Amino acid sequence: MRGIDCRVEFLVSSRQIFTSSLNQERLTKAAEAFELIPESQVLVLAPTRGAADDFSRALCDKLGALFGFHRMTLIGLATTLATELLTQRNLAPLSRLGIEALAARSVFASRTEGQLDYFGPVGDTPGFTRALASTLTELRMEGVTSERLAASGVPGKDLAHLLDRYGGALRDRSLADLAVIFDFAAQVVTSSSHRFLGLTLLLLDVLAESNAEQRLLSLLVQRSGAVIATAPAEDKDNVAVLERILGVKAVGSPTASGQGVSRSRGSTVCCYRVCTTSVAVGLL
């Protein structure tokens, strides 16, 4: 088991954010800070389960043994937290392929009824359904309403119709997408004593881009003990989000290493960017 460095007084409620352009430097800082925390169960969140596992194994090699290490992604945690509520309401989580299938059905039904003025001509083009599925997911994760979309112009009116039809399909088939899962998870964090709450929290380059992700992460931090977070120095948007959620300033010195993280989540044939007042459509 790991020991405690008696030279340093480390408060359980302390929060720290480490930034660097070097991956190894960020992980080393996180490991050093972790060694100073009194022994407790730990929740490790990373962009992938493999990344969380790698950090834990490296720490185990250094400290000899680790107990009570829970490793997962933010989406994985949200799903775990939401499981009980999903069961109580007889809802099944929806996969990415399932989201695309519902989006395709929504487009087909809307085009058949002649309800797509703007997207009708491109509704059957390659890549449209996948791009639409991503857009609908992002809209729901941001909490954008169909009324707000409809007021943004002709493209927004079509998207508002598709958003409503997609939401109706979820309800009719008793399905839960990411927005529902994150909402249920936030409810659990707020009102329950789940076993993953109140633990030491390690956030290893965790991205919280949407309102739903940031809300859950903020509630989780409030229910946690010590919180240690890392982020690439170049990713200023995410650093600002972490600083706001944790209530502390990040520490670290950027280095020109060329090892910055990319914010890209992949490319699709069509990109649909939804703004507060307009909807723009273009090819990547």
Image (spheres, rainbow, N blue to C red):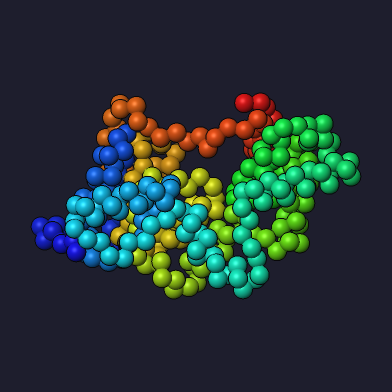
Task: Describe residue 177's horizontal placement relative to residue 79 as left or right.
Answer: right
Q: Is residue 131 above or below residue 97?
A: above
Task: Describe residue 73's horizontal placement relative to residue 31 as left or right.
Answer: right
- Name the quadrant containing residue 177: bottom right
**Residue at 88% from the left image edge and 43% from the top image edge:** 112
- The image position of residue 248, as x and y in percent, is 33, 50
Q: Is residue 40 above or below residue 154?
A: below
**Residue at 24% from the left image edge and 52% from the top image edge:** 59
Front residue of 54 and 206:
54
Task: Describe residue 253's horizontal placement relative to residue 247 as left or right.
Answer: left
The N terminus lies in which quarter of the figure?
A: bottom left
The reply to whether residue 150 is visible in this rendering is no
Task: Describe residue 111's horizontal placement relative to residue 260 as left or right.
Answer: right
- The image position of residue 191, as x and y in percent, is 50, 72
- Name the quadrant containing residue 138: top right
**Residue at 76% from the left image edge and 62% from the top image edge:** 172
Q: Is residue 125 above or below residue 178?
A: above
The C terminus lies in which quarter of the figure?
A: top right
The reply to whether residue 239 is visible in this rendering is yes
Front residue of 18 and 264:
264
